[in-house]
Image (tube, rainbow, N blue to C red):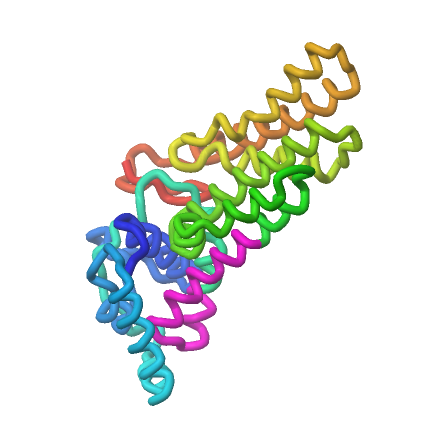
């Protein structure tokens, strides 16, 4: 079962980009081809409850014990059927899907069945979330327990282990806030930390139609504080960080616009495919 109503779109997006690695293209009708086994076992209910999870994992254990997963995973990679996954979602960047794309592709190479393929994609996103969020906890000079508590909230855990972009949005947001606290309360700024903050802000800003640009632009507060305190050293460092955020964000948007084809039904870009 899917974690959220829109998770199918994110799954199709990851599967679509995995298809591209194998040289498989969408159908003429714009559908994402899935392996026949994946299409037949694709979850039909878009909402979840504990009974659905219980049934899902009980069936998986039964299949593992009886080797059904291994036996059913012998289909050829060319055994695909078109499935209605309309290009995997509209106007979305691709880089939040890199972990799940790699995991899904490895699962297909290893001939794994549908259940471990789904879990591989989700666990890959969870691993990315844990790495970035752990870095945030390490970098913040205050409220480490608060950060940890926020990271294990049920809603956060649910989204971190889904195919959605939220794993990256939540972890980057936490990392930006943590580094902002670090630079606000401590003076020994490290160059690599400044780079990390600039990159995190630049990557977060384009996601979800620029919804999180205010979090990405938090380094502007460092610039304003340095101006008020007339601290030239801090002003230079904070201006470099904020400039890096703007530069990376602008590069992503400009490259997307340059590679987009307005006459096409779907417009290709460096970081994804946009539906007009």
- The quadrant in which residue 38 appears is bottom left
Residue at horizontal 49%, vertical 26%?
Answer: 214
Q: In the rendered view, does 164 fall on the left or right side of 141? A: left
Q: Would residue 19 be seen by someone viewing this image from the given angle?
A: yes
Percent x, y of residue 275:
29, 40
Name the quadrant of the C terminus: top left
Name the quadrant of the N terminus: bottom left
Q: Would residue 74 be seen by someone viewing this image from the given angle?
A: no
Task: From this view, report whether residue 105 is shown above or below residue 125.
Answer: below
Residue at horizontal 46%, vertical 34%?
Answer: 206
What's the magenta region? 104-130
- Residue 246 colored magenta? no
Percent x, y of residue 155:
39, 49
Percent x, y of residue 167:
46, 48
Task: From this view, report whether residue 182 is shown above or below residue 124.
Answer: above
Front residue of 134/99: it is 134
Percent x, y of residue 26:
29, 56
- Residue 129 colored magenta? yes
Magenta-colored segment: predominant secondary structure: helix
Front residue of 187/120: it is 187
Front residue of 36/65: it is 65
Residue at horizontal 55%, vertical 33%?
Answer: 202
Tag count = 0
Residue at horizontal 36%, vertical 59%?
Answer: 15
Q: In the rendered view, does 209 fall on the left or right side of 85? A: right
* Residue at the farthest bottom position: 66
């Amino acid at each position: 079962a899917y974690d959220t109503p829109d998770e199918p779109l994110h799954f199709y997006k990851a599967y679509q980009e995995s298809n591209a690695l194998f040289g498989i293209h969408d159908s003429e009708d714009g559908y994402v081809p899935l392996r026949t086994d994946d299409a037949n076992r694709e979850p039909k209910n878009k909402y979840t409850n504990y009974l659905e999870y219980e049934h899902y994992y009980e069936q998986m254990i039964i299949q593992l014990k009886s080797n059904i997963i291994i036996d059913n995973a012998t289909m050829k990679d060319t055994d695909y059927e078109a499935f209605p996954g309309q290009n995997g979602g509209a106007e979305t960047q691709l880089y939040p899907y890199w972990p799940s794309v790699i995991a899904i592709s490895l699962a297909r190479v290893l001939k794994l069945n549908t259940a471990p393929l789904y879990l591989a994609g989700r666990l890959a996103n969870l691993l990315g979330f844990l790495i970035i969020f752990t870095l945030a906890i390490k970098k913040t000079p205050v409220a480490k327990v608060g950060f940890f508590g926020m990271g294990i909230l049920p809603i956060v855990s649910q989204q971190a282990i889904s195919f959605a972009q939220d794993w990256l949005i939540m972890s980057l947001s936490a990392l930006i806030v943590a580094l902002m606290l670090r630079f606000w309360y401590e003076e020994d700024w490290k160059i690599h930390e400044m780079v990390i903050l600039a990159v995190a802000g630049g990557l977060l800003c384009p996601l979800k139609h620029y919804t999180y640009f205010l979090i990405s632009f938090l380094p502007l507060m460092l610039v304003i504080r340095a101006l008020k305190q007339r601290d030239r050293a801090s002003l230079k460092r904070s201006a470099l960080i904020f400039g890096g955020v703007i530069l990376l964000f602008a590069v992503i948007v400009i490259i997307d616009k340059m590679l987009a084809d307005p006459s096409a039904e779907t417009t290709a870009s460096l970081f994804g495919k946009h539906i007009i």
